């Protein structure tokens, strides 16, 4: 048998998790033919079929493929630990770092943070994954990512949250909305009005919890799992929405003007920060990323999202 490569195993795990070569390619930032070729080579070397190829449903792991994928994940985790040991011995952060980020603010935070970190630590190879909150918790607990940028929402006790920025909620309105000229609005002001809910796991629960102190529940007229779609629906007067990270533009993706109005009263803010498993900071590479993120907050790099620094 030819020697298996970590890259082949990485591609196998990614395709198994996403169910698609195209989605795995997007996740790993490589071309789909590269992944397809690696999977074919791996199947030839092992002499078994790893995937069932279904044109409509994509790819699913065979029973044998699932066993190989589970073992491949352990091998990749072991390789990451070897890199951590080398980094500790050498005193230099190096090796792979898998960073997850909550997809609702990934476009505003992650690319700039990653570029700066990679420039300062050229021996670290960052892989990023944009996930919802439930997926982040699952990925950390399965060691599929090393660290995540997210909110302090429903954090289980086996994970460690490091707060960076406090973000208070605001109402997102179209420019002609009846409340658009207000300096602030209350949850009671919004309760009877049509709402476009950003309907993501755990995130939606937070938005709805803001109404718990009112007699009325929000009047949800539209739901979407896409932040850009939500902003365009608000811009086209389907209803208001609620968010915590201010957009960099007061124009929706389709060109409609938007207005952000602070929500007054006793409403729960969210903390944006870093989430890891307990003990992950023992990795020099993970600790380097934590220190870099804290330094960026202190330098004002997160001011654009209108948050209160916590570090």
Image: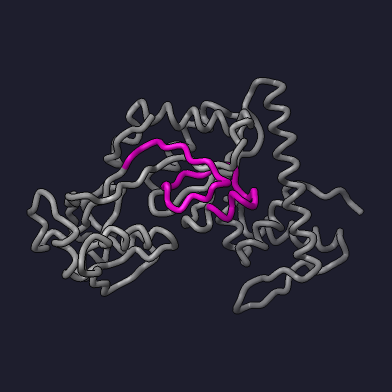
| 39 relative position to 216: left or right | right
State the image coordinates of residue 173 (x, y, percent, origin top left): 18, 59
The N terminus: image quadrant: bottom right
Q: Residue furthest right?
A: 1
Q: Is residue 235 visible?
A: no
**Residue at 58% in and 40% down:** 126
The C terminus: image quadrant: top left
| 303 relative position to 148: left or right | left
State the image coordinates of residue 17 (x, y, percent, origin top left): 63, 61
| 70 relative position to 97: left or right | right
- Give the magenta part as a residue range: 137-166
* Picture mark count: 0
State the image coordinates of residue 259 (x, y, percent, origin top left): 17, 54
- Depicted 142 relative to depicted 194: above or below: above
**Residue at 72% in and 52% down:** 73
**Residue at 58% in and 29% down:** 122
The magenta stretch spans residue 230: no
Q: Which of 91 and 210 lies nearest the eye of the viewer? A: 210
The magenta stretch spans residue 144: yes
């Amino acid at each position: 048998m030819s020697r298996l490569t970590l890259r082949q195993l990485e591609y196998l795990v990614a395709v198994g998790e996403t169910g698609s070569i195209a989605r795995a390619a997007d996740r790993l930032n490589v071309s789909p033919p590269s992944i397809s070729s690696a999977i074919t080579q791996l199947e030839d070397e092992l002499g078994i079929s790893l995937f069932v190829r279904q044109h409509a449903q994509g790819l699913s792991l065979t029973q044998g493929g699932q066993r190989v994928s589970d073992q491949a994940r352990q091998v990749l985790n072991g390789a990451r630990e070897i890199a951590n040991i080398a980094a500790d011995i050498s005193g230099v952060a190096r090796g792979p770092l898998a960073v997850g980020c909550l997809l609702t603010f990934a476009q505003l935070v992650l690319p700039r943070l990653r570029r700066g970190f990679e420039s300062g630590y050229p021996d670290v190879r960052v892989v990023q994954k944009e996930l919802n909150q439930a997926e982040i918790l699952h990925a950390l607990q399965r060691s599929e990512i090393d660290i995540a940028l997210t909110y302090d929402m429903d954090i289980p006790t086996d994970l460690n949250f490091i707060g960076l920025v406090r973000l208070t909620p605001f109402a997102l309105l179209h420019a002609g909305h009846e409340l658009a000229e207000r300096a602030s609005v209350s949850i009671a002001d919004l309760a009877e009005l049509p709402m476009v809910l950003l309907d993501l796991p755990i995130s939606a629960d937070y938005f709805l919890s803001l109404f718990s102190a009112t007699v009325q529940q929000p009047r949800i007229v539209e739901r979407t799992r896409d932040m850009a779609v939500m902003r365009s629906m608000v811009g086209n007067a389907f209803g208001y929405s609620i968010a915590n990270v201010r957009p960099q533009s007061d124009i929706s993706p389709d060109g409609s003007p938007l207005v952000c109005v602070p929500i007054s009263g006793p409403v729960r803010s969210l903390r944006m920060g870093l989430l890891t498993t307990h003990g992950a900071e023992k990795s020099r590479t993970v600790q380097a990323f934590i220190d870099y993120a804290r330094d960026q907050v202190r330098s004002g790099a997160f001011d654009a999202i209108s948050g209160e620094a916590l570090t």
